[in-house]
Amino acid sequence: LLSLEEHDPELFDLIEQEKSRQWRSLELIASENFTSRAVMDCLGSALTNKYAEGLPGARYYGGNEVVDQVEALCQKRALEAYGLDPEKWGVNVQPYSGSPANFAVYTALLKPHDRIMGLDLPSGGHLTHGFYTYSKKEGTRKAVSATSVYFESLPYRVHPETGYIDYDQLERDAGLFKPAMIIAGGSAYPRDYDYKRFREIADANGALLMMDMAHTSGLVATGELDSPFEYADVVTTTTHKSLRGPRAGMIFFRKDERGFESRINQAVFPALQGGPHEHQIAGVATQLKEVCSPDFKVYSQQVKKNAKALADKLTSMGYSMASGGTENHLVLWDLKPQGITGSKFEKVCDAVSITLNKNCVPGDVSAVTPGGVRIGTPALTTRTMVESDFEQIGQFLHEALEITLAIQEKSGPKLKDFLPLLEKNADIEALKVRVH
Ligand code: PLP
């Protein structure tokens, strides 16, 4: 019955340090958020002790009469959150996270080596949508995620000049490649998706349409972005980004004669996973209750307003935003005009307690040296920040960029010469104090 602090002070201290880091820094990673106390209560609850292989009402273990109700409640709230008719749509809430959710869909609905088309990683897609690296020297390609190991992928891209998905090129390529599935959605795309166009391209080629709304699922639930459910066959999501729940995943599927329900349920368990994490599922359930509240609608609206305020502030200072701005929760800042890489800027931001990540931007030649950074607003909006706060953040970022340029002036272009100059740099120390 010892607390963590009494039982393991070393680990307790590390967690306290991380808590302090999260609260002292400006958290701008687009895929992160701060969960509520109610969600944390679920994660640390007795549900973590229970095995529950199977589905509510049909388990391979005894003692699941309470857990069944928890999971059924989560399913019900998930369908309600997206306004879905339970006769037409079902949901599996057991995926441990977003990547296994996506892989379960592929194994349920495709055969090994079937063809798929997802947004390319350097264009803002996710690894699980199929991605290869290419060696020009050796003339080879390497599958980076299990998706591209087991399926044949031809990624589509954003237009290098506009930063918007190049639907015309996707249409031409799909006509030649004839994919079995087209995957919409991404991790670093600042615009909404044209689901009708995706559906038309899928239909013209007999392909299924999957939407991975991991990043935007909170904004979709509150109607702040278009809903994919009218057009997609399957929709996957994580639950810990703009939805603000615990780390987990969900798969929504159409209930019709194609039998997706049993294929997807079986792909999750027993094909890919074992016992579901019912403490996570409870956390998702309680978060979905919040998602349906008027407060969460206000939160989602503020997430978008804050992203726009930041994009406008940076643009007004002469900087370049990929696609010219944002319609969602993130901004993709193209640093190529400033002549610095995303890696260097990320390091300086880290040093001043601003947490963001380097990211490819349209027109990058190599995914290894990303030309920009991705900046998201969900986490700091949870901490009640509004447009004026994000204008101040824009100012801090501008100052961090000036510091980056000054250091690069001294170090030259190599990161290994750049990093040592971050130590004991007076400008960094001064900006860090103001950020705190
Ligand atoms: N899909 C998208 C679009 C994502 O952005 C991510 C994670 O960033 C995932 C899937 C994978 O989620 P997880 O990291 O929970 O496996």
Image (cartoon, grey):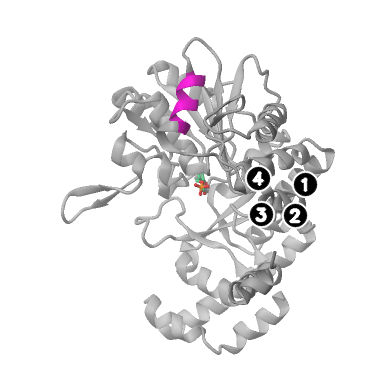
State the image coordinates of residue 93 (x, y, percent, origin top left): 59, 34
Circle 3 crowding by C-alpha within 10 Å: few under 14, some 14–19, many from 20: many
Q: Magenta residues, as a range?
A: 260-269
Label 1 is placed on what type of residue? Answer: Tyr
Q: Is residue 326 visible?
A: no
Q: Are marks 2 and 3 in contact (CB under 8 Å)?
A: yes
Numbered disc 4: secondary structure: helix
Mark 1 lies on residue: 299
Indicate whether 112 appears above or below 128. above
Mark 2 lies on residue: 382
Magenta highlight: main SS = helix
Mark 3 lies on residue: 33
**Separation of residues labelled 2 and 1 (CA atoms):** 7 Å
Q: Is mark 3 within 8 Å of ligand 1?
A: no
What is the number of the mark on residue 355?
none
Q: Are marks 2 and 4 in contact (CB under 8 Å)?
A: no
